[in-house]
Amino acid sequence: MKQGIHPNYREVLFVDLSNGFKFVTRSCVATREMGKTDDGRELPLFKLDTSSESHPFYTGTQKSVDNMGGRVEKFRNRFGKTAAK
């Protein structure tokens, strides 16, 4: 491998700010802070707004468009007839 052309690929601690979920993976992301893992290691820290532990799609709390209080049915009744003609 050529020296000096590859990014700094190392273990990074990712923390979900919405619920405190932490996980470690290898990444090239630029970080300025350091954080401690549960086992005591000091790693570069990257803060996330959402992760698979807090995203509505992965947690099963996402609401379907069809379950929004009849708004979809009203739209279909109002404009569906003209599209069928």
Image (cartoon, rainbow, N blue to C red):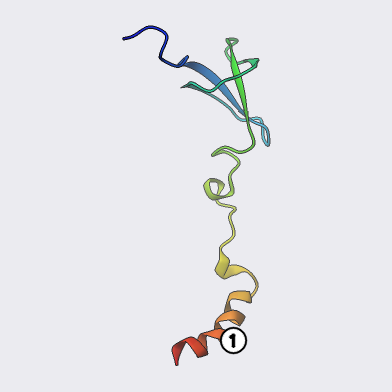
Number of other residues with Cα within 10 Å of mark 1, as a class: few under 14, some 14 to 19, many 20 or more: few
**Residue 37: in sight, yes or no?**
no
Residue 59, x across and y down, in percent: 56, 46
Above or below: residue 77 compared with residue 5? below
Taking the image as shown, residue 4 lies to the left or right of residue 38, namely left
Taking the image as shown, residue 11 lies to the left or right of residue 43, namely left
**Residue 63, quarter of the rendered image:** bottom right
Q: Quadrant of the N terminus?
A: top left
**Residue 69: in sight, yes or no?**
yes
Q: Residue at 54%, 50% (x, y): give it.
A: 57
Q: Disc 1 on helix, strand or loop?
A: helix
The furthest residue to the top: 3
Amino acid tagged 1: Arg
> How many marks are shown on the rendered structure?
1
**Residue 48, quarter of the rendered image:** top right
Q: Residue at 38%, 6% (x, y): give it.
A: 3
